[in-house]
Amino acid sequence: MIDRVKTGIPGLDEMLNGGIPKRNIVLVSGGPGTGKTIFSQQYLYHGLTLEEPGILITLEEHPVQVRRNMAEFGWNVKDYEEKGLFAIVDAFTGGIGESAKREKYVVRSVDEIGEFLDTVKNALRDTKAQRAVIDSVSTLYLTKPVTARNILMQLKRMLSGFGVTAILVSQVSVTERGFGGPGVEHCVDGIIRLDLDEVEGGLIRSIIIWKMRGTKHDMRRHPFEINDKGISIDTEKIVKSISRLSVYGGVEQ
Ligand SMILES: Nc1ncnc2c1ncn2[C@@H]1O[C@H](COP(=O)(O)OP(=O)(O)O)[C@@H](O)[C@H]1O
Ligand SMILES: [Mg+2]
């Protein structure tokens, strides 16, 4: 029996045959508004309820906004932060602004990959993290895609060194094929794809596990919803025959 990490996202652990194999580095890939941020925060908070410490590295939202958004779903992280079981690494503000001054883990410049990794390392060490999220890795290398693989490999090495099970959020554009570029897709242990498709005048959400090292998993695409409690997957239903434009690009048939 391999060790697994429960995501706590209704339906997902079942799709994963019990959970994410421990120490896997999983890419959660999708277009804007597909639910990547909520997905990864739900994963972290579930860990906290199981007494598994975690860290959230935020590159796209202010840490204050992250705490507020999480609280909207009932995921209050303040107490966990005070107890040293949860940490937000602020790689967003660059330390600028009053509230940023109160953050414990601040990355001044994400272009300094060394400083970035050191700060993440401190947060992992202090919290004894078992879970980590980077939201998003795309921001780390959008301006310099050639270094994407190198940065990802350094991150991966560090995360596996600490034995954490990590989610790397990867942004793709609405029409993009793939999961975030060849440098990225091939060096992770798992890929979960979130989609939003327009069908008959409305948007429907769906999820599919593309890859997960170390386990068998559900190969079907299921619909999910986002409500006041976060993400919930309906594993009874299968999403088929929707235009896969957002996954494959190209011209609609
Ligand atoms: N309380 C809520 N109830 C239902 N849907 C919500 C709620 N909060 C956010 N959403 C949905 O989640 C989307 C944002 O999800 P998010 O995880 O931030 O996306 P991403 O990170 O992939 O861009 C919003 O566009 C909205 O559709
Ligand atoms: Mg997001």
Image: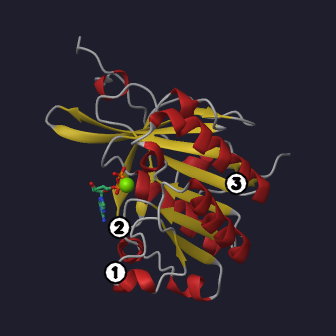
Mark 2 crowdedness (10 Å alpha carbons): few <14, some 14-19, many ≥20? few
Question: What's the mark number on residue 141?
Answer: none
Q: Amino acid at mark 3?
A: Leu
Residue flagged by tag 2: what amino acid is it?
Asp
Quarter assignment of residue 226: bottom left
Instruction: Indicate the position of residue 179 as horizontal and vertical percent values.
Output: 46, 33
Determine the residue positioned at 59% across, 82% down.
80
Q: Which residue matches tag 1? A: 97
Which comes sooner in the sequence, label 1 or label 3? 1
Q: Answer left or right for 31 relative to 84.
A: left
Element under label 1? Answer: loop
**In the image, residue 46 lies at what x, y percent?**
58, 67
At 28% from the left and 40% from the top, the residue drawn is 204
- Judging by the rendered image, the residue that carries numbered circle 3 is 159
Query: Viewer-nearest of labels 1 and 3?
Result: 1
Q: Compare marks 2 and 1 and give the one earlier in the sequence.
A: 1
Where's the C terminus, which quadrant? top left
Q: Is residue 12 above or below residue 231?
A: above
Q: Is 68 in front, or is 197?
A: 68
In percent of width and height, residue 75 lies at: 47, 75
In the image: residue 224, left or right of residue 153:
left
Mark 2 CB lies closer than 8 A to ligand 1: yes
Identify the disc placed on residue 228. Answer: 2
Mark 1 residue type: Gly
